[in-house]
Image (tube, rainbow, N blue to C red):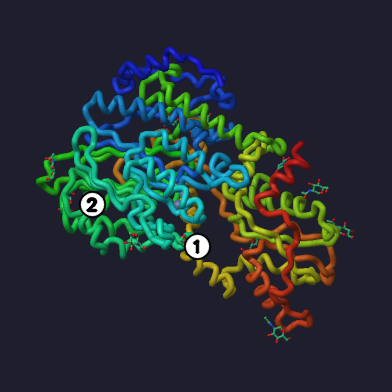
Amino acid sequence: MKFLGILSVFVAIAITPAFACEEGHEHEHERRDSSVKPQTPTVSIASPTVPLVWGDINIIHTTDSHGWLLGHQKTSPPEPNYSGDFGDFSSFVQHMKAEADRRGVDLLLIDSGDLHDGTGLSDGFPAGGVDAHDSNAIFSELPYDVLAIGNHELYIYANTLDVYQNFAPKWNGRYLSSNVNITVADKHGNAVSTPVGSRFTKFKTKRGRKVTSLGVLYDFTGNDKNTTVQPVAAMVQEAWFKEAIQEQPDVFVLVGHMPVQRDNWPLVFNAIRAVHPLTPILILGGHTHIRDCVQLDNRSMSLESGRYMETVGWLTVKLDDNKSNKPLTFSRRYLDPNRVTYQFHTGLGNLLFNTLQGITISAQLQGLAKRFDLSQAFGTAPQDYFLSRAAFTSNQSLPGFFIREVVPFAISVNNSRASIPNVILSNSGSQRFDLFAGSFTKNDQLTVSPFTDAFQFIENVPFSVASQILDDLNDSNLPSRKRAEESMAELYRRGDVSMRFNEWLQDQWERAPVERRTAQNLTVGYVTTDSCPGAGDDTLHSPLTFFEVPDFIGSNLPNVSSSDLIDVVFLDFIASSVVTILNQIVAGTDTQNFSTADVKSYTDILTNEVFGVYAQAKWN
Ligand SMILES: *[C@@H]1O[C@H](CO)[C@@H](O)[C@H](O)[C@H]1NC(C)=O
Ligand SMILES: *[C@@H]1O[C@H](CO)[C@@H](O)[C@H](O)[C@H]1NC(C)=O
Ligand SMILES: *[C@@H]1O[C@H](CO)[C@@H](O)[C@H](O)[C@H]1NC(C)=O
Ligand SMILES: *[C@@H]1O[C@H](CO)[C@@H](O)[C@H](O)[C@H]1NC(C)=O
Ligand SMILES: *[C@@H]1O[C@H](CO)[C@@H](O)[C@H](O)[C@H]1NC(C)=O
Ligand SMILES: *[C@@H]1O[C@H](CO)[C@@H](O)[C@H](O)[C@H]1NC(C)=O
Ligand SMILES: *[C@@H]1O[C@H](CO)[C@@H](O)[C@H](O)[C@H]1NC(C)=O
Ligand SMILES: *[C@@H]1O[C@H](CO)[C@@H](O)[C@H](O)[C@H]1NC(C)=O
Ligand SMILES: *[C@@H]1O[C@H](CO)[C@@H](O)[C@H](O)[C@H]1NC(C)=O
Ligand SMILES: *[C@@H]1O[C@H](CO)[C@@H](O)[C@H](O)[C@H]1NC(C)=O
Ligand SMILES: *[C@@H]1O[C@H](CO)[C@@H](O)[C@H](O)[C@H]1NC(C)=O
Ligand SMILES: [Zn+2]
Ligand SMILES: [Zn+2]
C-alpha cells in the first residue's frame, strides 16, 4: 500500500476541520484513491444530505463488529456502502473529536460487544492461535471511552481468557462486564470467579461532566464452562449495583450487549429511575444486529447500531438544569460506514481526511489479512447468492445453492457412497452471510459458512419414505415441529439472533410502498423505522428484497423408484428429529423403524469446508 499525501495527513491533524457542510455548501466527495481500496467502483454515489445534530454529550457507537474491521470489500450492492475500514473510522473519530473540542462539547466513543466470530481477521488465525486476539489488538488503537462484553466473547473459554488477560486491561477500567464473570486460578491455584472487566465505571468527561456507566449482557445461556452470566434481574438486586448508582452523575451512560427493545433494559432503567427521577440516561445496546431506537421516558434515549460495521450510531443529548421533568432534546442517526459518509460529516476532501493513525491502522489490517492469507482464492463466483434476498427456489438463493449444488458435490468427493442415490437435509440457518460475485477466498469461506456441523446418514431408507421427511420437518402441525418452535426462545437465549434480524428485514420490505422499493434515485440498503422521533437513516435507501426461507431445506430428489433404498444424509444436530420423523412415517407399515444407532458419519468434510471444495472444482 502506498502512503499517499503524507504531508496533507499532518496538515489534517494540525488544522481544525472546516465542517463547511453545516453551512450548507456543496461538496465534491471524491472516491477513495484507487491505491487505497482498488475494488470500489466509481458509479453513482449515495450520500448523506443532512448534517449531524450536535448536543452537549455526543456519542459515536459501534456494536457487533464481529471482526469486520476491513469493512465490506465486495462490489455488489449494498456492500460498497459499508466499505469504510477501521483506519477510515479512526480518521473519522479523530476529526469528530477535534470538532467536539472546537464546539466545547463532549464526544464519547462506545462499543457494545461481540468482537469475536465473523471474518477472517478474527477467525482466520493459524493453528494454536486464539480467535480475535490480533484483530482486537488493532481495535484497541481506537480511543474508546466505554466498552461492554458480548455473548460472542463467551462461547469458548480461551477467548474469554484472552479478553480478560489482554484486552480488558487496555481500557483503564472502562471495559465493562457488570454481570459476567470468568473463573481463573489464583496464585495459590484456587479457582476464583471474577468480573472479566469492571462491573461499572465512574469518570469525568473532557468537559468535566460526571458519567456513571454499566456494561450489561442479556440473559445469555450459551456460555462456556468457567464463565458466568448473572441474570439481569439478579444483577439489579446486588449491593454493588445499588451502591454504584446511588451517586447522581450528570448522565448515566448504560452500555450493554442487549437489544434496546423486547429485553431487560427496563429492569436496569427502572432501578436507576427509582433513585434518580430526572437524571439523563443514555442506553447503547446491541446483539440483535438491527438498527433500533426507543425512549423509555422523555429524559432518556436508547440506541442500537446494527452489525458487522454496516452501521455507525450517533446519539446526542442537550443537557438542562435537571430541575423539571421537561423532555430533553435528543438526536440519533444511523450512518453507513464509508468514506463518503465520513467525509460529508467532517467536511474534508479525500486527502485531508486521512490521519496518520488512520493510515497506519489500515496498513496493519492489510498486514494481518496477509499474514492470515485471507485472499487465498478457491475460485471465482459467477454471481451473487443471497440468504434472504432471493426466493428459495431461485438460483440466486444461497440456502438453495448450498443444498442443491454445493453440498451434494462436496460430500461426494472421495466418498465410496457417492454412487448411492441420496436426499440431503439441512436447516436453512446453516449459512451466516451472503456470497457475492467475484473471487471466493478463505476470508469469504469464513464469513459465509463458518459453522462446523458434520454430515451424518441413515442407509437403506425406501425412497417413498425418504422423500417425505422434508415436508414433515417443515410442517408446523406436527408435534416435533411444535417443539422446535417452542425452542425458538431457547435458541435466542443461546445467542441465535437470526429470527429477530430476519423479522427486521421482512418488516422493512413489507412496509415499503412500491415507489420506495423501485426508486431509481436510491441505492439498496437498510430502511429503518424505529420508535424515536424523526428520520434515523443518514443515507436514504430502497429496501433489500426479502423472501422467507423454509426452516428446513433439502436437495433435489433423485430419479429412482419408490421402493429403491437410498441414503438419507443430514446435519448432525438434526439427527434426532430425522429419526423421530422417520418413525412417524413408517409407523403402522411393514418398513422397520429407525433408531439413533442407525446414524453414521457420511464424510469428514464439515459445513465450513463445502464451499471451498465446490469453488475449487467448479469456479476455476
Ligand atoms: C453504495 O452502494 C451503491 C451500490 O449499491 C454504489 O453505487 C454507491 O456508490 C455506494 N455508495 C457509497 C457512498 O459507497
Ligand atoms: C474451571 O477453572 C478452574 C481453575 O482454572 C479449574 O480448576 C477447573 O477445573 C475448571 N472447571 C472446568 C469445568 O473446566
Ligand atoms: C463474580 O465475581 C465476584 C468477585 O469475585 C463475586 O463476588 C461474584 O459472586 C461473582 N458473581 C457471579 C455471578 O459469579
Ligand atoms: C415527560 O415525562 C413526564 C413523566 O415521565 C411527564 O410527566 C411529562 O408530561 C412528559 N412531558 C412531555 C412533554 O411529554
Ligand atoms: C445536574 O445535576 C448534577 C448533579 O446534581 C449536577 O452536577 C449538574 O451540574 C446538573 N446539571 C446542570 C446543567 O445543572
Ligand atoms: C439462473 O436463472 C436464470 C433465469 O431464471 C437464468 O437466466 C440463469 O442462467 C441462471 N443462472 C445459473 C447460474 O444457472
Ligand atoms: C480427495 O482425494 C484427493 C487424493 O487423495 C485429495 O488430493 C483431495 O484433497 C481430496 N479431496 C477432498 C475434498 O477431500
Ligand atoms: C427520489 O425521487 C423521488 C421521485 O422522483 C423524489 O420524490 C425523492 O425526493 C427523490 N429522493 C432523493 C433522495 O433524491
Ligand atoms: C418445506 O420446505 C420445502 C422446501 O425445501 C418446501 O418445498 C415445502 O413445501 C415446505 N413444507 C412446508 C409444510 O412448509
Ligand atoms: C428418470 O429415469 C427414467 C428411467 O431411468 C428415465 O426414463 C427418465 O427420463 C428419468 N427422468 C429424468 C427427469 O431424468
Ligand atoms: C420400533 O419397533 C419396535 C418393535 O417393532 C418397537 O418395540 C419400538 O418401540 C419401535 N420404536 C420406535 C421408536 O418406534
Ligand atoms: Zn452479534
Ligand atoms: Zn450478540
Q: Quadrant of the N terminus?
A: top right
What SS does tag 2 mark? loop
Looking at marks 1 and 2 on the same chain, the residue that comes earlier in the sequence is marked by: 2
- Which residue appears at 34% of the width and 29% of the height? 50
Judge by depth and name the residue closer to the eye, 222 or 18.
222
Residue 209, position in %: x, y?
19, 38
Query: Looking at the picture, how far across and down is residue 157, in whole percent?
Result: 49, 56
Amino acid residing under circle 1: Leu
Q: List the residue tagged with mark 1.
A: 491
Spatial CA distance of label 1 from label 2 is 31 Å
Q: Residue at x 48, y 55 (%)?
A: 497
Q: Secondary structure at mark 1?
A: helix
For label 2, being within 8 Å of ligand 4 is answered yes
**Percent x, y for residue 581?**
66, 73
Which residue: 75% across, 38% down?
A: 619
Which is more toward the observer, 164 or 526? 164
Residue 314 visible here: no
> Quadrant of residue 602 in the image?
bottom right
In the displayed structure, would residue 281 be above or below residue 488? Answer: above
Does the rendering let one see residue 163? yes
Q: Quadrant of residue 25?
A: top left
**Which label belongs to residue 297?**
2
